[in-house]
């Protein structure tokens, strides 16, 4: 079928909306009419060349929409179902069989390969030439997308469908870091470095699980104000204090029990580690360019019992965790809609600019009506 898609034709180039051809779904695939798609930092990192796939490519990995058709082997969803799209995985390796799907043995190939995992083909073409696609098993910066049975999650009535896409990556990553990866205890202290989508989702999750001290650290005062509304008990702007680490340690009575680092800046990761109390843990969510290294004093591990834990996708099993977040949203306990501003699909470059400037925390592109 002919669709419209936002194509990146060169590294660092703009998203250009073009008419392209989309394949029919194969046996394990799902054709989704995209209603909304969140813009995530990872999309922009790929555009800048920090991660594969290379241009030309259709990105987008926080899509939501309506199932239009399914392959013969698909049983989880059917035409007409409302769905959120999330990351892809093989569902067969040892980690997937234990529901640790964010650590799928072939996660990178399924999500950053720019092609179908099975045979290297692409479901998107222009003038018979393939365009990189299957990004996170979806490439949802388009009016329609080919997804997979593994990475589609039904969305119940009563949840705005155009809002659901960010649950598939940024929101579940921040919330999951707190609720799954770190398993933050009630009554504990939590510091979140970076108050974007991931960080503010972590703040909201901290309130849900009963952390009594929640510190948000960010350079934008408007984001810190929102963090306070969403559950932060203290906020810190590094430009307004002499020592970020000491400020956080004072706010957490000697050091935080848990920290979430969502900026992808190694100097901030060092601050997060140094802000911990003894036996504290920092969950590393922010992803800098491949090959980035950080230096920590080994004795700080040995003498304090602190630990550093990598976090992918919030250790989420999306088919169970996304419905949990939807229910928390419906109860008014997880108001992630406070992070969102909507943009028409044709205004994708405006949405990107608003995201990069910090003006908008989570832009969502609207492709069609629900």
Image (cartoon, grey):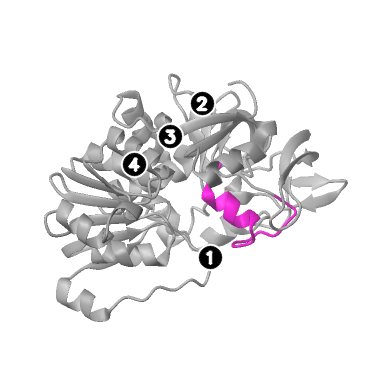
Task: State which quadrant residue 226 falls in.
Answer: top left
Mark 1 or mark 2: name the one nearer the start of the chain.
2
Q: What label sits on residue 339 in the rendered view?
A: 3
Mark 4 or mark 1: name the one nearer the start of the chain.
4
The Cα–Cα distance between marks 3 and 4, rounded to whole angstroms, is 12 Å
Q: Which residue in the rendered view is the most extreme toward the right?
A: 127
In which quadrant is the N terminus drawn? Answer: top right
Q: Label 2 belongs to which residue?
A: 161
- The segment highlighted magenta reads 39-57
Q: State the residue in front, 156 or 366.
A: 366
Find residue 138 and report its horizontal and vertical position in percent: 61, 44
Q: Label 1 belongs to which residue?
A: 289
Q: Label 4 belongs to which residue?
A: 224
Task: State which quadrant residue 261 falls in.
Answer: bottom left
In what element is the residue under mark 2?
helix
Whether the residues at callouts 3 and 4 have beta carbons within 8 Å, the answer is no
């Amino acid at each position: 079928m002919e669709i419209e898609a936002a194509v990146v034709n060169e590294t660092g180039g703009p998203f250009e909306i073009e008419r392209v051809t989309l394949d029919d779904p194969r046996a394990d695939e799902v054709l989704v009419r995209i209603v909304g798609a969140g813009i995530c930092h990872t999309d922009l990192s790929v555009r800048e060349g920090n991660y594969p796939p290379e241009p030309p490519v259709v990105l987008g990995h926080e899509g939501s929409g309506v199932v239009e058709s399914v392959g013969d082997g698909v049983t989880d969803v059917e035409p007409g179902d409302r769905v959120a799209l999330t990351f892809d995985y093989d569902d067969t390796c040892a980690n997937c069989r234990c529901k640790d799907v964010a650590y799928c043995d072939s996660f990178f190939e399924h999500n950053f390969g720019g092609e179908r995992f099975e045979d290297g083909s692409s479901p998107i073409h222009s003038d018979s030439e393939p365009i990189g696609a299957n990004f996170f098993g979806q490439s949802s910066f388009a009016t329609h997308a080919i997804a997979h049975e593994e990475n589609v999650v039904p969305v119940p009535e009563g949840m705005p469908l155009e809002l659901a896409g960010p649950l598939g990556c940024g929101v579940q990553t921040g919330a999951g870091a707190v609720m799954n990866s770190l398993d933050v205890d009630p009554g504990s202290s939590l510091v979140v470095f970076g108050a974007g989508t991931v960080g503010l989702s972590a703040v909201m999750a901290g309130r849900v699980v009963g952390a009594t001290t929640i510190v948000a650290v960010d350079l934008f005062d408007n984001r810190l104000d929102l963090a306070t509304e969403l559950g932060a008990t203290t906020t810190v702007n590094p430009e307004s204090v002499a020592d970020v680490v000491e400020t956080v340690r004072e706010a957490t009575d000697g050091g935080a029990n848990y920290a979430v680092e969502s900026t992808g800046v190694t100097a901030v990761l060092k601050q997060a580690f140094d802000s911990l109390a003894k036996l504290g843990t920092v969950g590393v969510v922010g992803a800098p360019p491949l090959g980035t290294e950080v230096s920590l004093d080994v004795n700080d591990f040995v003498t304090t019992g602190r630990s550093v834990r990598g976090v992918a996708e919030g250790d989420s099993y999306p088919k169970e965790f996304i419905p949990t977040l939807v229910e928390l949203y419906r109860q008014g306990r997880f108001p992630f809609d406070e992070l969102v501003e909507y943009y028409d699909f044709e205004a994708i470059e405006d949405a990107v600019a608003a995201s990069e400037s910090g003006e908008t925390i989570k832009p969502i592109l609207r492709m069609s009506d629900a």
